[in-house]
Image (tube, rainbow, N blue to C red):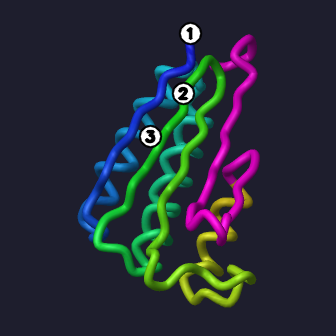
Amino acid sequence: MPTSQIRLSVPAEPEFARSVRMLAANLAVVCGMGIDDVEDVRMACEEAFVFACATGPSSVSVAFSASEGRLDSEFSLGTDRKPTADPSAEPAWAYADIILSAVCDSYEVDVEAGVLRLAKRTDVAHAS
């Protein structure tokens, strides 16, 4: 499967978390991930969206990069109130950090770029 780029702009309102979560899960399936990885992606992207909303934007831009066995995502953060250099100082970060560290292969808050990046990979040969 060639790498596909998917972009989404969503109002920064909690009722839109499901839309982000469902698209992310669908993309994980397209990437050939098994049910456990799909659930991890679903949970991670919902939590990333909620965290991004807490940083104060009017909308959240989400960029996905989907390829065989890998899904990367990037969530824009509010420009008026970017997370501090220490994301743990953000009230919404404590729970997000717990979830993302449990279900992502890697994640980072890039304060300079104003984004939260997530990566999830699977061993396609052993995916169920």
Q: Residue at x 24, y 65 (%)?
A: 15
C-alpha distance separating marks 2 and 1: 9 Å
Q: Which residues are magenta?
A: 103-128
Type of amino acid at the residue the image marks with label 1: Met
Q: Does the CB distance between marks 3 and 2 fall below 8 Å?
A: no
**Residue 33: x, y in percent?**
59, 25
Type of amino acid at the residue the image marks with label 3: Ala
Measured along the vertical axis of the image, is residue 120 above or below residue 12? above
Secondary structure beneath dot 3 equals: helix
Q: Which circle's residue, 3 or 2, is located before the other in the chain?
A: 3
Which mark is nearer the camera, 1 or 3? 1
Name the residue tied to disc 1.
1
Secondary structure beneath dot 1 equals: loop
Crowdedness near tag 3: few (<14), some (14–19) or many (≥20) residues, C-alpha within 10 Å: many
- Which image quarter holds the N terminus? top right
Name the residue tied to disc 2.
66
Name the residue tied to disc 3.
24
Which mark is nearer the camera, 3 or 2? 2
Secondary structure beneath dot 2 equals: strand
**Residue 112: x, y in percent?**
65, 69
Type of amino acid at the residue the image marks with label 2: Ala
**Quarter of the image where one finds residue 60:** bottom left
